[in-house]
C-alpha cells in the first residue's frame, strides 16, 4: 500500500461502511474518477488493522482517500476538502448561517448517531454485555438522533434535506437510513427522513455509491 501512485485518486473503502458511502457519493457528484481498493473490516481480523493500512490511516478505519498527493482520513474532513478544492459542484449553501445548519444536521449523523452504532462499538458492546444487546443499543441511538433530525428537516427541507440543493447532510442520510432498516428501527415517526431518502435513491450518483454496486459487496 505504501507504493500507491499519489497522482491517482484512490479510495480505500468497505462496501457497507457508512463513512465510505458518503465519500463515494461526493466523488460521484463532483465527477472525480477514482480507483477503489477494498478493505474488509472483518476478514483476517479486520484488514484495516494491518501494518500496511495503518501506515496510511493511523486510526485503522475506512475510508482513506489518496488525492492530490494527500492521504486523507475521516469522512467529514474529506468532504470539506473536496468542497474547498472542487467547488464547481457545490455541496454547501452560500450563506454562513445556512452552511452552519447543514453542518449541524450532518453532525447529528456524523457525531451523535453513527459513531455509537458502528462496527467497533457494537463489537465492544457484544464483549461487555453480550451479542443479544447490540441490536437494542444500535436502535436506541439511531432513534435518538432521528428524533432531532426529523424536526430540523421538517423546518429546513425541500426536495432534499436543505431546500432543493444536495448538501453534505444528504450525503450522510442514505447510510444511516440503511442502518436503521438493518437494525429494525421503526421509521413511522420519521416520514420526512423516509421521503428524502427515497428521493435521493433515485439519483444516479447515489445509486452508483450504494453498497450493492460496490466491487466488494457481499450478498
Image (tube, helix red, strand yellow):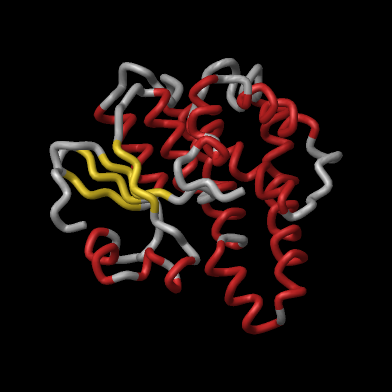
Residue 211: tell me if it is visible: yes
Residue 104, above or below 61: above
Residue 30, above or below 115: above
Residue 113, above or below 148: below
Residue 101: tell me if it is visible: no
Residue 132, above or below 38: below
Closer-to-camera residue (86/97): 86
Figure quadrant of residue 131:
bottom right
Figure quadrant of residue 35:
top left
Residue at position x 49%, y 27% from top?
167
Q: Is residue 105 left or right of residue 194?
A: left
Q: Is residue 62 left or right of residue 156?
A: left
Q: Is residue 182 left or right of residue 58?
A: right
Q: Position of residue 202 (x, y in %)?
A: 62, 20
Closer-to-camera residue (40/32): 40
Which residue is situated farthest in the bottom direction here? 128
Q: Position of residue 27 (x, y in %)?
A: 37, 31
Q: Position of residue 189 (x, y in %)?
A: 84, 40
Closer-to-camera residue (190/32): 32
Amino acid at each position: 500500500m505504501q507504493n500507491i501512485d499519489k497522482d491517482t485518486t484512490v479510495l480505500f473503502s468497505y462496501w457497507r461502511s457508512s463513512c465510505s458511502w458518503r465519500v463515494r457519493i461526493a466523488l460521484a457528484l463532483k465527477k472525480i474518477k477514482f480507483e477503489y481498493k477494498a478493505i474488509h473490516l472483518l476478514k483476517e481480523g479486520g484488514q484495516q488493522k494491518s501494518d500496511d493500512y495503518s501506515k496510511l490511516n493511523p486510526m485503522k478505519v475506512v475510508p482513506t482517500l489518496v488525492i492530490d498527493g494527500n492521504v486523507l482520513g475521516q469522512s467529514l474532513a474529506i468532504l470539506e476538502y473536496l468542497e474547498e478544492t472542487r467547488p464547481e459542484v457545490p455541496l454547501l449553501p452560500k450563506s454562513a448561517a445556512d452552511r452552519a445548519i447543514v453542518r449541524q444536521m450532518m453532525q447529528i449523523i456524523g457525531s451523535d448517531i453513527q459513531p455509537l452504532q458502528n462496527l467497533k462499538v457494537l463489537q465492544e458492546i457484544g464483549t461487555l454485555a453480550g451479542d443479544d444487546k447490540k441490536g437494542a443499543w444500535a436502535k436506541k441511538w439511531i432513534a435518538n438522533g432521528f428524533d432531532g433530525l426529523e424536526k430540523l428537516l421538517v423546518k429546513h427541507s425541500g426536495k432534499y434535506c436543505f431546500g432543493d440543493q444536495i448538501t453534505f447532510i444528504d450525503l450522510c442520510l442514505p447510510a444511516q437510513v440503511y442502518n436503521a432498516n438493518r437494525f429494525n428501527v421503526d421509521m413511522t415517526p420519521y416520514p420526512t427522513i423516509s421521503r428524502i431518502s427515497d428521493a435521493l435513491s433515485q439519483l444516479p450518483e447515489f445509486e452508483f455509491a450504494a453498497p450493492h454496486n460496490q466491487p466488494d459487496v457481499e450478498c
